[in-house]
Amino acid sequence: MDLEKIRKDAEAFTKELDEEYYQNLAGFKDELNISGIYQKYGYLFGREAVDYVKGLRDSAEGEEKRQLSLLYSFMAGEYISNITAELDEKFMTAEAKATVTVDGKEVPYRSISSLISNEDSRERRSELDALTDPVVDELNAILKERMLKLHDLSVELGYKNYIDMVQDLKGIELEPLKKQMEEFLRDTEKVYVDAMNAALEPYGISIDEAERHDVSYLFRAKEFDPYFPKDKVVDNWKATMHGIGIDPDSQNNVILDTEERPKKHPRAFTMPVEVPDRVILVITPHGGQDDYQSMLHEGGHTEHFAHVDRKHPFEYKYLGDVSVSESYAFIFNYLPTDDLWLKQYVSMDDTEKYRNFAFLNKLFFLRRYASKLLYEMELHAKRDIDGMDARYKEIMEKGLKMRHKANRYLLDVDDGFYVSQYLRAWIFETQLRKHIIEKTQRDWFNSHEAGNILKELWSYGQKYNVDELARMIGYDGIDVRPMRDEMVSALRR
């Protein structure tokens, strides 16, 4: 086999696949036709090619081993995706086409979450949420078949189970991270419960009574909307980028898709179709603080991929530890927790109330993802998943202290323990932000020097993982304690 041809074709495959996902998620087309792309490049994901690259990886050393490890991880992952492609298409198409009847009108399933988060009536929110249950049941039937197939494929590839496979392919150890997050859940429980009860009290709800739709509404936080208008979402991001020396309007390699379409996915996302030459940021602005955070988050991803050194090989431009790009997304995502940024960029003079809310929002998601990690470690420890809906409900309710629907037990799972990479990103983001402030100034978002630090890190792509990057900036590796201390201190104010 020809290794260079494999690399060239793998890059072409990735570009075509990302373009297809963009077209579907951006609402341009209902059908997701990825099986044809897999067929076109089918040899890449056959066992012969996967085993060939694995053999090269196992005998390589140094830089060559790093590159081949990323290539093998990609090919083994896509070998699995190739086999599950029809189920993926079936799920994405079903989700895109699904509708819910609301007051006699057909509403796209993907739009219901936005309706719920903006609905003032608790009873009405509950009704809207319940209307999605038949769709969730339909989607779960597809996801269960897919999950069982994933578990079987991990064993077929020679691994003990799905956990063992992910650890090898991604080069991370999940058990130590799980222990860190169990400690984090324990150490932040009191401040979380107290802060959440205080936030819910104006709505006449205690934390143990709250449901998913209540939290969606709470974190929509409409009371702060005057500071976060819909028509300023993109401009706010551009202004923030100008602060660190970047002019998005002059970036020919960055495309902003802000157009409203009925079937456009409600969640903002970045699609790095051609790194670094065609990076698409997709968002449908609706206003509100969560919209600004989403724009800042996806803008972090966008600038990362747009600044990758184009001389890098395919592996470093497209592959690697996704915790890295998530860290760059989070460092902008959480600017609204900074009183100086709030005063300057959204003209908020009295920032205390909003900052308390923003830190609670962050802690909620940290605890949610910590709980998801505990759940997924159980979910993927065995090939059979019977009874895991009940375990999902139990574990999530223990971590978040509020009611959960058991039927979300598969919809709330991303492939490859992506939850672990989010957690590692959150941990490193705290360390990176502290490093940038020490090297520049307190309001680092007004520093071109801070921008230069980030541009240098961005240029590496995802060649290095977050543990290596943490060591590069003076830490011993990623450490959850700075993040824990920041959360406890912020919510005890």
Image (cartoon, rainbow, N blue to C red):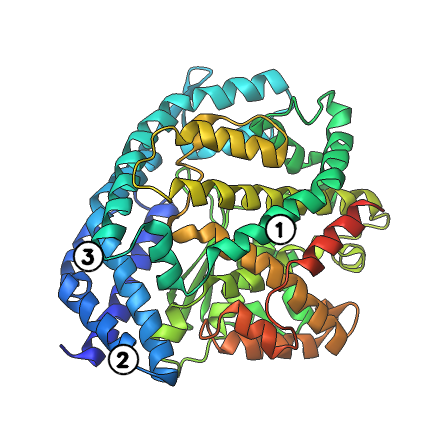
Q: What residue appears at the point 67 percent right and 43 percent down from the top-left corner?
A: 186
Label at residue 38: 3
- How far apart marks 2 and 3 lie (CA) works out to 28 Å
Q: Are the residues flagged by discs 2 and 3 in contact, CB closer than 8 Å?
A: no
Which mark is nearer the camera, 3 or 1? 3
Amino acid type for the residue under numbered disc 1: Gln
Mark 1 Cα within 10 Å, few/some/many (few <14, many 20+)? many
Which mark is nearer the camera, 2 or 3? 2
| Apparent side of residue 420 relative to residue 263 in the rendered image (left or right) | right
Name the residue beneath numbered marker 1: 293
Label at residue 158: none
Label at residue 59: 2
Q: Secondary structure at mark 1?
A: helix
- How far apart marks 3 and 1 lie (CA) works out to 35 Å
- Whether residue 113 is situated above or below residue 88 in the rendered picture: above
* Pointer 2 or 3: first along the chain: 3
Q: What residue appears at the point 54 percent right and 29 percent down from the top-left corner?
A: 115
Where does the image place residue 292, in percent across and percent down from the top left?
A: 63, 50
**Closer to the camera in the image, 208 or 453:** 208
Q: Secondary structure at mark 3?
A: helix
Which mark is nearer the camera, 2 or 1? 2
Regarding residue 230, the answer to whether it shows in the image is no
